[in-house]
Image: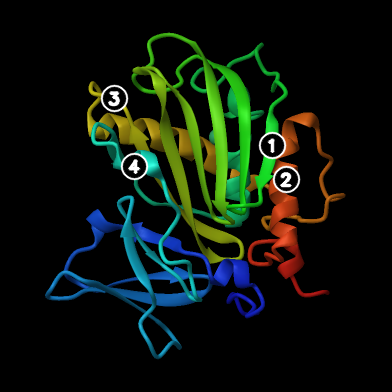
Amino acid sequence: MTHRADQNDRAVLDSWHAVGFLETLGTAPTTTRLLGVDLTIQRDADAAITVHAQGHASPLPVAERYGCLWTSLGTPPATPLAIPEADEPDRRLVCCGSIDVHASGLRVVENFLDMAHFPFVHTNILGAEPQTEVLRYHTEWRRDVDEIWATDCRFHQPQAALSAVGGQDTGYIYRVASPFVTLLYKTCPNDALRPDVIALFVQPTGPERCRAHPVMFLIDDFSTQADLIQFQQKIFLQDRIILENQRPRLLPLDARAEIPTRADSLSVTYRRWLKQKQVRYGATSALPDT
Ligand SMILES: [Fe+2]
């Protein structure tokens, strides 16, 4: 069975995908995989990066943005998604390391959008019993930019960020910019007006496998880079245990496949959006009938 994307899977093929952190790319060529296709990444003498894909005569499009190398197997937009906060001079870019996950990348995005798991998976960090209820929030499909947003989300968190002192009611805004690219904006303990921004760039390597690249854009003058990375990695490794135990590993896009609750309104909207875009890679509909 091929693990390559169907040529009709345009939303996936024509997206930009992060395929690694720039800081890890040396002068020697490195290899990775995107949508079942082997890639070779090379930094030329003039420091320009070239990405070659097995079976493709021409080099792939490349972009260097948000600490990552981005590429596409199709015809992507002019640039990867805009994150205006990334240009604020006092924000710290924190590249948290790439993590392989044996699950569909769509599952990894969906899990990133879910608040209900905080008290049970990130106990005493992003949530704690008995405060387990997900309060009503607003979800919308912004048609002008073709993105999914969820606003007015709130959750009580014992340790919302490394720099947080004591518990806080954290406000969240979630954003899905493309099927495998998602971000959240959450109350920053160090700035009353500007939120911290945490992005998750997911590189689908196979239908049931991916590499996650978490990137944070923080307002934090206190913490060391190593401690910030460790805090985020600890949280993501807690998620990975859950993700790798989900069955099916592919994300079901049939609305009847999993029973929605109110807390899942963002998940339901994400799945409907994927279905409407006819995304197949990483979804159960990608499986051949057996
Ligand atoms: Fe989580």
Under mark 1, the amino acid is Thr
* x and y, in percent, of residue 30 in the image: 29, 70
Q: Secondary structure at mark 3?
A: loop
Looking at the image, do the residues carrying marks 2 and 1 touch, with CB atoms under 8 Å apart?
Answer: yes
Q: Secondary structure at mark 1?
A: strand
| Tag shown at residue 93 | none
In the image, is 227 to the left or to the right of 185? Answer: left
Q: Residue at x 31, y 31 (%)?
A: 228
Vertical relation: 103 (above or below) 243: below
Quarter in which the C terminus is drawn: bottom right
Q: Quadrant of ligand 1?
A: top right
Under mark 3, the amino acid is Asp
Residue located beneath label 1 in the image = 139
Quarter in which the N terminus is drawn: bottom right
Residue located beneath label 4 in the image = 86
In primary-sequence order, the first of circles 3 and 1 is 1
Q: Give the Cα distance between marks 1 and 4.
A: 24 Å
Residue located beneath label 3 in the image = 220
Q: Give the Cα distance between marks 3 and 4.
A: 14 Å
Q: Give the Cα distance between marks 4 and 2.
A: 27 Å
Q: Give the Cα distance between marks 3 and 1.
A: 29 Å
Q: Residue at x 61, y 57 (%)?
A: 104
Labels 4, 2: front one: 4
Q: Residue at x 28, y 33 (%)?
A: 91
In primary-sequence order, the first of circles 2 and 1 is 1
Q: Secondary structure at mark 4?
A: helix
